[in-house]
């Protein structure tokens, strides 16, 4: 299965600022997925990122708040913009390999103060 | 809309016990089902992937079964160890392809004490 490097692993940010999370995959993948896990909750899909096109956002998530870049087939970034304490969550990226299912990055634990 | 439920929400057992974690889903038209492990504050580690045509998958002390018609999957952990302590998540892919969207259960928090 794929190996994903995600960074930063954690950060503490001031409200009103932005944080960009990076994910690097060890091989080319068509789609990359970004999830949020709020405290005590399960995972919720934020958006699907395809190389060369706009990301597709799930209901309740908008591009202005969570802009995504996908410059090539091995890399993607998610930015959490104009942060508030409600954005404190674990953010995870994921890829899929046929026959292996989904693989996740190690997560970014974000605390907004 | 697919809904995934995991029972129990939390489980505490002594080391060495065999245990069963349950996952149920409302729409049986799934492509596959995946079990994950999550350590506190960390990402997810894939444990087992079961395709819709399969009945079970095994990896070491782990065995996952799938009964698609009844909308159920179980994860069996044999001879539990303290290192098995984690949250176990069940995720269903009902998207019709390998790239279908995952719907996650709320997880079972497992504590194995020495």
Image: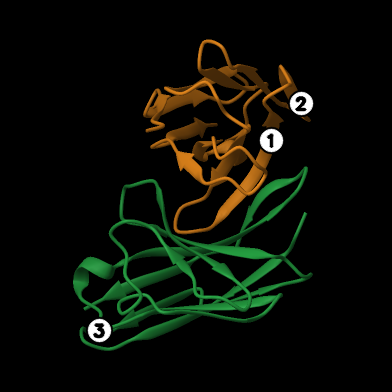
Chain colours: A green, B orange
Task: Tell me how far mark 1 sits from mark 2, CA to CA.
Answer: 7 Å
Looking at the rendering, which quadrant does residue A30 occupy? bottom right
Contact (Cβ within 8 Å) of mark 1 with mark 2: yes
Q: Nearer the viewer, residue A2 or A33?
A: A33
- The picture places residue A105, in percent across and down from the top left corner, at 60, 63
The label on residue B58 is 2
Q: Earlier in the sequence, mark 1 or mark 2?
A: 1
- B18 relative to B110 in the view: left or right: right
Looking at the rendering, which quadrant does residue A58 occupy? bottom left
Which chain contains the residue that carries disc 3?
A
Q: What residue is disc 1 on? A: B48
The label on residue B17 is none
Q: Residue furthest top?
A: B70
| Quadrant of the frame with the N terminus of chain B | top left
Name above or below for residue A86 compared with residue B10: below
Looking at the rendering, which quadrant does residue A1 occupy? bottom right
Q: What residue is disc 3 on? A: A82
Which element carries disc 3, helix, strand or loop? loop
Q: Residue at x 50, y 17 (%)?
A: B71
């Amino acid at each position: 299965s794929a190996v994903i490097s995600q960074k930063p692993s954690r950060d503490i940010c001031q409200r009103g600022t932005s944080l960009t999370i990076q994910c690097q995959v060890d091989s080319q993948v068509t789609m990359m997925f970004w999830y949020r896990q709020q405290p005590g909750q399960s995972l919720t899909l934020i958006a699907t990122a395809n190389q060369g096109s706009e990301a597709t956002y799930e209901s309740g998530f908008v591009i202005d708040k969570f802009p995504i870049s996908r410059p090539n087939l091995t890399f993607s970034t998610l930015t959490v913009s104009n942060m508030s304490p409600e954005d404190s969550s674990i953010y995870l990226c994921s890829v899929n390999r046929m026959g292996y299912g989904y693989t996740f990055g190690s997560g970014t634990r974000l605390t907004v103060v | 809309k697919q809904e995934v439920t995991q029972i129990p929400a939390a489980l505490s057992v002594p080391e060495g016990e065999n245990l069963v974690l349950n996952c149920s889903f409302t729409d049986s038209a799934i492509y596959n089902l995946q079990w994950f492990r999550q350590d506190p504050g960390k990402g997810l580690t894939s444990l087992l992937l079961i395709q819709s045509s399969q009945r079970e998958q095994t990896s070491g002390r782990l065995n996952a079964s799938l009964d698609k018609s009844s909308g159920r999957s179980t994860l069996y952990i044999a001879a539990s160890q303290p290192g098995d302590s984690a949250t176990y998540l069940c995720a269903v892919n009902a998207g019709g392809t390998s790239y279908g969207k995952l719907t996650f259960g709320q997880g079972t928090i497992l504590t194995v004490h020495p």
